């Protein structure tokens, strides 16, 4: 502040020699103002960033919400655009493994596409050989029987879950003859028996019976195979000397 005292030099003071304080902004005050402005700007930026983070966090969707949004988007598609999008869903499913028509139908409709769009896409894929339930069922039977020893009821139930109809299931199951099933069951039982040294005959019988039944073998096949495998099985879990 500057205090003017002489009215001759400063007539604006009047004749009473009143002291008048006239504010003057010096360098120090200007600097302070600049700092205040900078602080205000920084505070505004910080607040904006915090608000941005808060906004982004509120926009994060749960898996269920994302699925609902995707279904809504797909349901709104029409014509060629809808068919191409649904076809992409089916092809991505087929990229991972072979699938039945019913499995692909479920994948398409689950993502919001209409029944008409799903059938149109599946018919096109069937026409070019990318969907073949007969070949798919036959492959499942061969692979499961060779790798796991699965047969009978176990295989039929798996094929039903995949949407294969009864006629195609019967056709696929015809690849396994009774002799094939007997030989595979005997092989499985012998392998299992080698891991049961020290187990008495009654428990060994129960374990072998449960294992073969879970793989789908018939009761008659189980009885025949287990009786042969445990024919010389002693009560102490050791094979008896012939």
Image (cartoon, grey):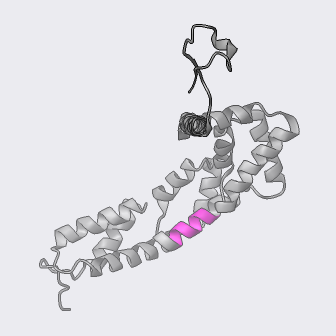
Along the viewing direction, whichever of 46 and 225 lies nearer the viewer? 46
User: What stretch of residues is rendered in magenta?
Assistant: 139-146
Tally of numbered discs: 0
Query: Is 230 placed above or below 41 here?
Result: below
Quarter of the image with the C terminus is bottom left
Q: Which SS does the magenta portion mostly show? A: helix
Q: Quadrant of residue 119?
A: top right
Query: Is 144 placed above or below 183 here?
Result: above
In the image, is residue 236 part of the stretch drawn in magenta? no
| Residue that protrudes farthest toward the front in the picture | 8
Q: Residue at x 56, y 35 (%)?
A: 36
Q: Quadrant of residue 2?
A: top right
In the image, is residue 140 part of the stretch drawn in magenta? yes
| Residue that protrudes farthest toward the bottom in the picture | 242
Left or right relative to 207: residue 128: right
Query: Is 152 placed above or below 30 here?
Result: below
């Amino acid at each position: 502040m500057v205090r003017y005292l002489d009215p001759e030099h400063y007539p604006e003071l009047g004749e009473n020699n009143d002291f008048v304080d006239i504010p003057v902004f010096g360098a120090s005050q200007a600097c302070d103002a600049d700092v205040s402005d900078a602080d205000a700007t920084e505070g505004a930026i910080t607040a904006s960033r915090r608000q941005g983070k808060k906004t982004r966090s509120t926009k994060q969707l749960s898996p269920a919400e994302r699925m609902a949004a995707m279904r809504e988007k797909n349901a709104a598609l029409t014509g060629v655009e809808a068919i191409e999008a649904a076809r992409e869903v089916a092809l991505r499913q087929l990229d991972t493994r072979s699938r039945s028509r019913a499995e692909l139908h479920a994948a398409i409709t689950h993502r919001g596409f209409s029944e008409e769009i799903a059938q149109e896409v599946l018919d096109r894929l069937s026409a070019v050989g990318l969907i073949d339930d007969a070949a798919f069922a036959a492959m499942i039977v061969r692979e499961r029987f060779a790798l796991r020893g699965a047969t009978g009821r176990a295989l039929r139930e798996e094929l039903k879950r995949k949407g294969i109809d009864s006629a195609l299931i019967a056709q696929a199951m015809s690849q396994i003859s009774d002799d094939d099933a007997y030989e595979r069951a005997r092989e499985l039982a012998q392998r299992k028996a080698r891991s049961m040294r020290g187990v008495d005959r009654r428990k060994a019988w129960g374990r072998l019976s449960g294992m073969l039944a879970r793989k789908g073998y018939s009761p008659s096949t189980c009885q025949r195979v287990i009786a042969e495998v445990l024919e010389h099985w002693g009560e102490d879990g050791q094979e008896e000397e012939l």
